[in-house]
Amino acid sequence: MGKLVKQEIVRQKIFAIRGKKVMLDRDLAELYGVRPIALRQQVKRNIERFPEDFMFQVTKEEADFLVSQNVIPSRKSLGGYLPYAFTEQGIAMLSSVLRSKKAIQVNIAIMRAFVKLRELLAEHKELAQQVKEHGKILNEHGRHITTIYQLIDELMAPSEEKPKKKIGFHP
């Protein structure tokens, strides 16, 4: 990876919106070293390359949520427009629209960050599944131990036997 973009910086700019991992146009413009308006203009000139699953415009409610989560400082910082969110495929498509050497290096770094994020999420899911399985085993063991203690308590309880009648002749 080049010195221009560190993966950690990129990972911090990846957000979940509408259940998708995305990056905002303003963050991408910053990474590419272009003005956000220039990035949006290039996208609009090549809009056929950006279907809804590659890029979408954030709603007012989503923008308000991003402000509340400190992803963006305020709605005013957006300059009066709602940002575009790019999925991994949309970011890959940006490389065909923005053709500078820096854009190529930035795209490589971004793709690596998305791959790393997927790996971390996969590890997290695997770990969560293991914890769930261990929890089931511990639960089962707990039930067995409870049963054992109940049986021990029954065995140790004093017996309440009635006196037995003697066998034989009673005068």
Image (cartoon, rainbow, N blue to C red):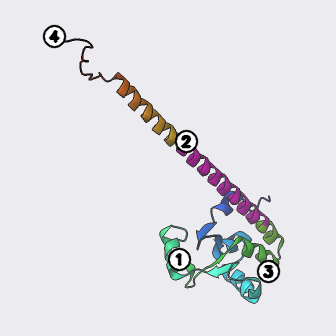
Regarding mark 2 in the picture, which secondary structure is present there? helix
Q: Residue at x 51, y 80 (%)?
A: 76
The residue nearer to you, when weighing 85 against 37, is 85
Identity of the amino acid at label 4?
Pro
Identity of the amino acid at label 3?
Val
Q: How much space separates mark 4 and mark 3, taking CA atoms?
A: 116 Å
Residue 20 picture location, percent across and down: 63, 70
Q: How much space separates mark 4 and mark 1, taking CA atoms?
A: 99 Å
Segment tinted magenta in the rendering:
108-136
Q: Is residue 118 magenta?
A: yes
The residue nearer to you, when weighing 161 against 91, is 161
Asked whether, in this view, residue 65 is left or right of residue 42, the answer is: left
Q: Which mark is residue 62?
A: 1
- How crowded pointer 4 is (Cα within 10 Å; few <14, some 14-19, many 20+) is rated as few
The residue nearer to you, when weighing 65 against 155, is 155
Identity of the amino acid at label 1?
Glu
**Residues at discs 4 and 1 in contact (Cβ within 8 Å):** no
Q: Nearer the viewer, mark 1 or mark 2?
A: 2
- How crowded pointer 3 is (Cα within 10 Å; few <14, some 14-19, many 20+) is rated as some
- How crowded pointer 1 is (Cα within 10 Å; few <14, some 14-19, many 20+) is rated as some
- How crowded pointer 2 is (Cα within 10 Å; few <14, some 14-19, many 20+) is rated as few
Q: Which residue is mark 4?
A: 171
